[in-house]
Image (spheres, grey):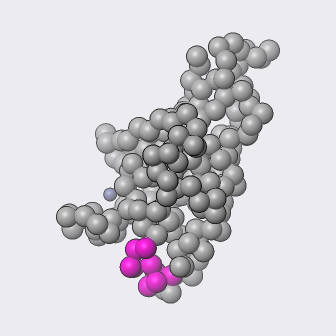
Amino acid sequence: MYQLSFSYSFESAHRFTRCESIPCMTPHGHSWRAVLWIQSLHGSLNENDMVTEFQSLKKQWKKFIQQTVDHSFFHHENDPLLPYLNQEIPKFRGLSFPGDPTTEMIATCFLLKAFAMHPKEIQAKPFKIEVFETQTNFVSYTAESPSEIFKNHPKLKSEKQWWNQAEPYSRERFLNSSK
Ligand SMILES: [Zn+2]
């Protein structure tokens, strides 16, 4: 089976609301990298000796990283700092998560986003994501389908959330963060 990946870096901040560690509760940034893996749906190559034309997925994914993820603040959907940030920063670039934005949570939502963006006509599908919080620390997450993810994380099922929508740029994050 062929497996391909594309990797993009981004600079974003996060903080945890439930944590023993003061550095983790303090908003702070990382130089992150997300590596999205896709695998072919069959073992053969197409007439151009490629697995598939996956440029459309790559383009959408790049747009999502650059326009939605980069220079944003990953936050718990109920972070008590949100009302102040929304009041002080017009169109605050927040990316909401249904829990603290740990690297594991980010990887889970990003893989769901890749499934939602995946053009059905290409002969390959996402199956794995690696999210690097630093050059050396990363989380790898693998799932066959969104339903497999929802089985383990029922709170991610909501259709209205950015991770379940196909478009890379979602105004939902503004709506979510202004709750
Ligand atoms: Zn951190």
The relative height of residue 123 versus residue 18 in the rendered view (above or below) is above
How many numbered marks does the figure carry? Answer: 0
Residue 176 against residue 125 in the figure, above or below: below
Where residue 101 sits: x, y (%)?
Answer: 40, 59
Q: Quadrant of residue 124?
A: top right
- Can residue 33 be seen here? no
Give the image location of residue 77, x and y in percent: 46, 69
Query: Left or right: 53 with respect to 33?
Result: right
Q: Is residue 81 magenta?
A: yes
- The residue lying at 58 percent from left, 43 percent from top is 146
| Magenta region, residue range | 78-86
- Image x and y of residue 179, in percent: 53, 79
Tell me which residue sits at (46%, 83%) in the image: 83
- Determine whether 119 is above or below 177 in the image: above
Residue drawn 45% across the image and 56% down it: 11
Residue 56 lies left or right of residue 108; in this view the side is right
Does the stretch in magenta take in 15?
Answer: no
Which quadrant contains ligand 1?
A: bottom left
Against 3, residue 127 (above or below) is below
Residue 69: give x, y in percent of width and height: 53, 58
Residue 94 shows in this picture = yes
Q: Nearer the viewer, residue 9 or 17?
A: 17
Which residue is at 51% across, 36% downward? 143
Q: In which quadrant of the rendered image does the N terminus lie?
A: top right
